[in-house]
Amino acid sequence: MLDTSSAIGIDIGGTNLRAARVSGAGAILERVSERIDREADAAVRRIVELVRQLDRPEVTAIGIGVPGRVDARRRAVLSGGYLNLAGTALAERVEGAVGKPVAIDNDCNMALVAEIAVGAARGRENVVMFTIGTGIGGAIVQEGQIVRGRGTAGQLGHITVDVNGAPCVCGRRGCVETTSSGTAFARHVLEAGLPSGTTLDEVIRRAAKGDEAAGRVLDAWIRPLRAAIDSAAAAFDPDLVLLGGGLGKAAHRALRKAPALAPWYQCPVMAAELGDDAGMIGAAVSALIEHRSPILPPVPLALATEPSALERPA
Ligand SMILES: [Zn+2]
């Protein structure tokens, strides 16, 4: 295991604010979860209070996963959803209040860091992750590093699967988020005349028994997701595609109904393991990686939980 240092990881979700003190080996030592305040300033004040509550002398850094577009290198939140933290100087305010370094990143990047450190992608260096919930988020790790592009790469929910499709929040049409998110699933259910509140697992069960309406819903939801996964596989050639978020496990089951169509761009697809804990664990692990030792070069995420990798001489 690393050493005795730990970090605080915060996951800002659509509904809940989750915070935990996490060991250098990625284990949750203490946790708090509560409903989130949708007003940005109140939410930032509450985050500061939670950090103070969980803080201990051995805590060396704080990581915060934020929904929406985040430029992690500049520590800037560029856009948000229900709770818009753009322009709140989130990292600086928490840092100023607590006096310990703060790292922020997109929540999907944090979740993927956790899955590589202690979850389903343990030890992998090339991983693509789709986070499927109300919307669809994404994250990409190549050669052990998060792919950032100019700042916000990895928005896999905005892979186009239908050029004539429904309008998307991003301003374009037919993004996979418009066909295969939780929101899109509810719409397919209504359009097929199934009872509202029908779950994805119920649709999978009904479709397997030959229910035509359920079969149409499943097709409309899972085939575009398969197309997006195959596009990501073609673009990034990952070891593994992970499906996370609230619908990740069910999506993985549904994907049996939509196998890859051709051999060129295929790779294993797995469900993520850490569930709702991924964001907190990843935020803490990211903060430890970023603030452990600034004189050393970046360490591939897959090696980051090995003490020899973090503590080797530069
Ligand atoms: Zn879009």
Image: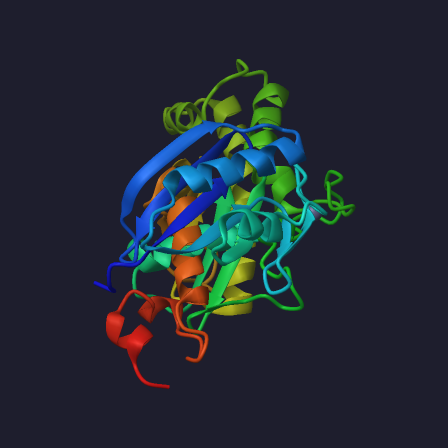
Residue 81 rendering spot, x and y as whole percentages: 66, 38
Quadrant that contains the N terminus: bottom left
The residue positioned farthest toward the top in the image shown: 195
The residue positioned farthest toward the bottom in the image shown: 314
Quadrant that contains the C terminus: bottom left
In screen coordinates, is 303 left or right of 106? left
Total marks in image: 0
In screen coordinates, is 8 left or right of 25? right
Residue 291 image-quadrant placement:
bottom left
- Is any atom of residue 223 visible in this view? yes
Q: Which residue is drawn at 59% across and 16% down?
A: 193
- Is any atom of residue 247 visible in this view? no
Residue 44 image-quadrant placement:
top right
Q: Which residue is drawn at 30% across and 60% down?
A: 122
Work out whether 127 lies above or below 10. Answer: below
In screen coordinates, is 81 left or right of 270? right
Of the pair 224 and 138, the residue shown nearer to us: 138
Of the pair 94 and 261, the residue shown nearer to us: 94
Of the pair 36 and 82, the residue shown nearer to us: 36
Q: Which residue is drawn at 52% across and 22% down?
A: 213
Work out whether 224 lies above or below 236. Answer: above
Work out whether 295 lies above or below 260. Answer: below
Residue 306 rendering spot, x and y as whole percentages: 26, 69
